[in-house]
Image (cartoon, rainbow, N blue to C red):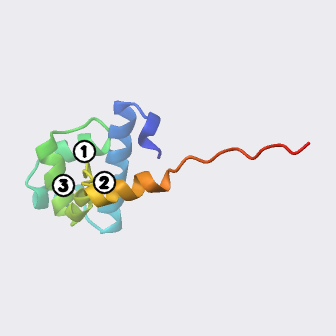
Amino acid sequence: MNFDFATEPEIRAELGKRLADMRIARGLSQSKLAAKAAIGVATLQRFEQGEGTTLSNFIRLVMALGKIEDFNTLLQSRTLTIDALEQQHALKGRKRASRKHT
């Protein structure tokens, strides 16, 4: 799914589906994953159905599935050094159009 133009409910539904797919791929029942994440089964069911949950519960589920390392790239800010900025600027040099020869 491309999240660029998705609505918030569409993103919730996709995240719930992905979480359910991961749970099933790992051979975990809803009750086992819920217990591992220390949340209620009904909370997990609602999330898998795209109804959402709290950020805290979402983090617990991701941790319980062993996917917390994926958060390393989430909302990551890029820090550029002055040297890197100067190199980017140098690469963007202006170019003139060639002249027509008559």
Neighbor class of circle 1 (other Cα within 10 Å; few <14, some 14-19, many 20+) is some
Residue 29: give x, y in percent of width and height: 25, 60
Disc with the residue nearer the chain's start (2 vs 3)? 2
The picture quadrant where one finds residue 63 is bottom left
Q: Is the C terminus in the top left, top right, bottom left or bottom right quadrant?
A: top right
Query: Which residue was labeled with disc 3?
Result: 61
Query: Real-space Cα distance between discs 1 and 2?
Result: 11 Å
In front: 80, or 29? 80
The label nearer to you, 1 versus 2, is 2
Residue 56: give x, y in percent of width and height: 11, 45
Helix, strand or loop for disc 1? helix
Helix, strand or loop for disc 3? helix
Contact (Cβ within 8 Å) of mark 2 with mark 3: yes
Query: Which residue was labeled with disc 2?
Result: 19
Query: Which residue was labeled with disc 1?
Result: 45
Query: The disc labelled 1 sits on which kind of residue?
Result: Gln
